[in-house]
Structure formats: structure tokens, C-alpha cells
Image (cartoon, grey):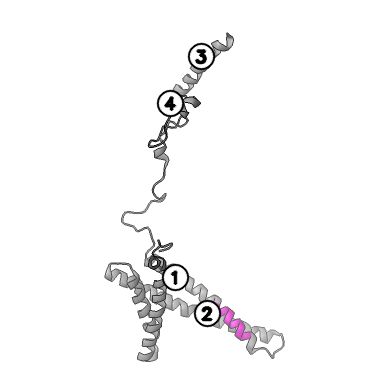
Amino acid sequence: EDMDNNTPASGGFKGGLGSLFGGGTPEYSNTELAGVPLTGMSPLSPYLNVDPRYLVQDTEEFILPTGANKTRGRFELAFFTIGGCCITGTAFGTLNGLRMGLTETRGMPWSKPRNVQILNMVTRHGASWANTLGSVALLYSVFGVAIEKARGAEDDLNTVAAGTLTGMLFKSTAGLKGAARGGLIGLAMSGLYALYNNWDHLKGTSPSHY
């Protein structure tokens, strides 16, 4: 009898706490929950008292400014492109300078003059390649941004045009033939890059990158 008398009291105590903290949470038995059909409806959670549909994230979890694109434009990518080309040129030039320094000083004993000569080769070639690739990346980025602003569209045509103009201007000091040769090289490289970006689309599958 004491246990029977305590059962309503405990229920009242739970109800009092529930009303104290914002309303009592309805209690469901396993039998009642098992009989609720789940197909075609979203039942209320007996623990959270919240419709589970409001907990589903159907959109991205980041906020974009009004009118902003979900992908970075050419102007934003220009900084990454220029910096990456400079770092790549430095690494390649350093390795090339080290190779050439070791080759040219092969007959010299390991001494301070040989170390200085190798170091000079490494420094000179590293700076030269960094300057070259950085200049190419700067020209390509400037042409890409300018063409995008002029056309008002962003597509592979901008990439090919920017690559062609970059090659022509970079080799313009070698005359008309040099400019034409540089334009062809830029056209070929930018065309291959555009083809790589659209490879998934050409195969009929969804692209994995932009």
C-alpha cells in the first residue's frame, strides 16, 4: 500500500518539476510508441518535445553575403595562384641550382669555396624561377580578372583567353615570332586545364570540382 501511495506522489512530483521548468513533458510507454506509424509523418520526440523536421539541415551551415557566389572568383584565387607559383618556382629552382652546382664543382674538393659556389647557384636559380613563375601567374590573374569584368561572365573562355594573352605578352620581347610561340604555348596549356576541369562533364558524370 505504501508503494501504491508513493506512485501518484512521484508522478505529481515529476509533474511539478516539469511545470516549473517550462511545462511537463508527456510520458509515453513503449507500447504507445510502438504503435505510432513512422511512414509519411514526423512524430514529436517524447524526450525533446520538438518536431524532428526542424533538426534536419537541408542547407549549408555557412552564411554568404548578399549576392556572393558559393565559389571563389578569379580575384580571390589570384593571391593563391601567385603565391603558389612563387613557392613552386623557388622549390624547383633550388633543386635545379643544387644539381647544377654539384655538377659544375664535381672536380673540386669539399671546401668553403665549393660550398659558396653551390650556395650561389641555389640562390640564383631559386630566385630566377620564382620570379619567372610569379610573373606568369600575375599576368594570367590580371588578364583573367579583366576579361571576366569585361564579359560579365565566368567560364572556360576566360581561362583560354587569359592563358593565350599571358603567353603572348610574356614572350613579346622576343619579337612577333616569339609572341606567337608564347601565345600558342599559353593556348595549349590553358586549353588542357579547361579540358581537365570539364572532364567529368564530358564523361557524363557530375563534376567533383569546380
Q: Residue at x 39, y 62 (%)?
A: 72
Within 10 Å of disc 4 (Cα), the crowding (few <14, some 14-19, many 20+) is few
Along the viewing direction, whichever of 73 and 114 lies nearer the viewer: 73
Give me the disc on residue 22. 4
Q: Which mark is residue 127?
A: 2
Q: Which residue is mark 1?
A: 81
SS at badge 2: helix
Image location of residue 95, percent across then percent down: 59, 79
Question: Is 181 rendered above or below residue 205?
Answer: below
> What secondary structure is found at the residue carrying circle 3?
helix
Q: Is residue 178 in view from this perspective? A: yes
Q: Amino acid at mark 3?
A: Pro
Judge left or right: residue 93 versus residue 104: left
The residue lying at 36 percent from left, 53 percent from top is: 64
Three-letter residue code for mark 1: Thr
**Which label's residue is closer to the chain start, 1 or 4?**
4
Q: Which residue is mark 3?
A: 8
Q: Quadrant of residue 196?
A: bottom left
Q: Is residue 123 left or right of residue 29?
A: right
Asked if labels 1 and 3 touch by Cβ distance under 8 angstroms, the answer is no
